[in-house]
Amino acid sequence: MDQTGRSWVDAARLTVVVGHFGSGKTEFSVNLALELAERGHPTALADLDIVDPYFRSRERGDLLAENGIQLISSSQSCVDADVPSMPAEVTRLFDQEDLYGVLDIGGDASGARVLARYRRRLAESKARILCVVNANRPLSDTAERAVSYIRGIEAAAKLPVDGLVNNAHLCAETSLEDILAGGKLLETVSSQTGIPIVCHMVPKKLCQEASAYVRPVFPVSIYMKKPWE
C-alpha cells in the first residue's frame, strides 16, 4: 500500500497538463517530470505550450538534462495556425512504450487544438489529462469559472479531463491559508464535475503543516522564475 498518497505520480505513462495562463501548470509539469525521473523512469517533458512566452519548460533545459530528462520543445513560429507546428519528436512519447512523458500544453483554444491533434494517440496510450486550477487567478477564482474552463477544454479537445490539481499560488508569499482555500474551491469543482482531485501542490517548506489538512500533498520546488527575477 502506498503510504505517501503519491501513487498517482506514475499511475499513467503519459500525463497531459493543462491550465490557465499563470495557473502553475508548467511548474507542476517540471516537478512531475523530476519526480518520475527520481523514481527511475526514463522520462521526457514535452513543452507544447505555443502561447505562453514567459513560463516555458524549455527554460529549465539544463535542470532537466542534469536529471536525465529528455526535452521536446515546440516552436513559437506558427502560433496562429489552425494546426500548430509540433516537433516530430512528440511521436516518441507514443511509440517508446517504456518512456514516461509529461506534456505541458497551453490552456486556451490553441492548446485545445494541440490536444485534438493527438487525440487518437493519447487515447491509445491511455494518457491522462490533469488540469491545474489556481484559485488566485481571475479565470479560475470561482467554482463556476473553473468548471466552465474545464468543460471548454474538454469540448474543444474532445477528450475528458481525468484529474484536478490544486495550486494556490506557489510564489514566495504562499501561505497555508492559500492552499486550504484552493483546496476548498477544488472540492466544489470536483463535486460539480465528478473529476477527482489528484493532489495539492505545496511548497516543500509548508508540506508538513499542510498535510494535516489536505491530501495527497505534492511537495514542489519553484523553478519557473518570472523574467524580471
Image (cartoon, rainbow, N blue to C red):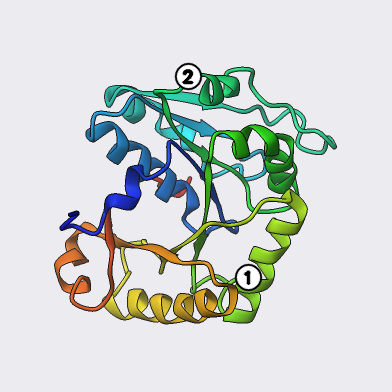
| Residue topped by disc 2 | 96
Identity of the residue drawn at 20% across and 64% down: 207
| Residue topped by disc 1 | 139
Residue 116 placement, left or right of 160: right
Say if 82 sits above or below 152 in the image: above
Identity of the residue drawn at 19% across and 54% down: 2
Mark 2 crowdedness (10 Å alpha carbons): few <14, some 14-19, many ≥20: few
Mark 1 crowdedness (10 Å alpha carbons): few <14, some 14-19, many ≥20: some
Identity of the residue drawn at 57% across and 56% down: 19
Amino acid, disc 1: Leu
Q: Is residue 99 visible?
A: yes
Amino acid, disc 2: Gln
Of 22 and 121, nearer the camera is: 121
Residue 78 placement, left or right of 223: right
Q: How many marks?
A: 2
x and y percent of residue 222 in the render? 32, 50
Q: Label 2's element?
A: loop
State which mark lies toward you, 2 or 1. Answer: 2
Choose top left, top right, bottom left or bottom right for residue 209.
bottom left
Choose top left, top right, bottom left or bottom right for residue 30.
top left
x and y percent of residue 133 in the render? 51, 65
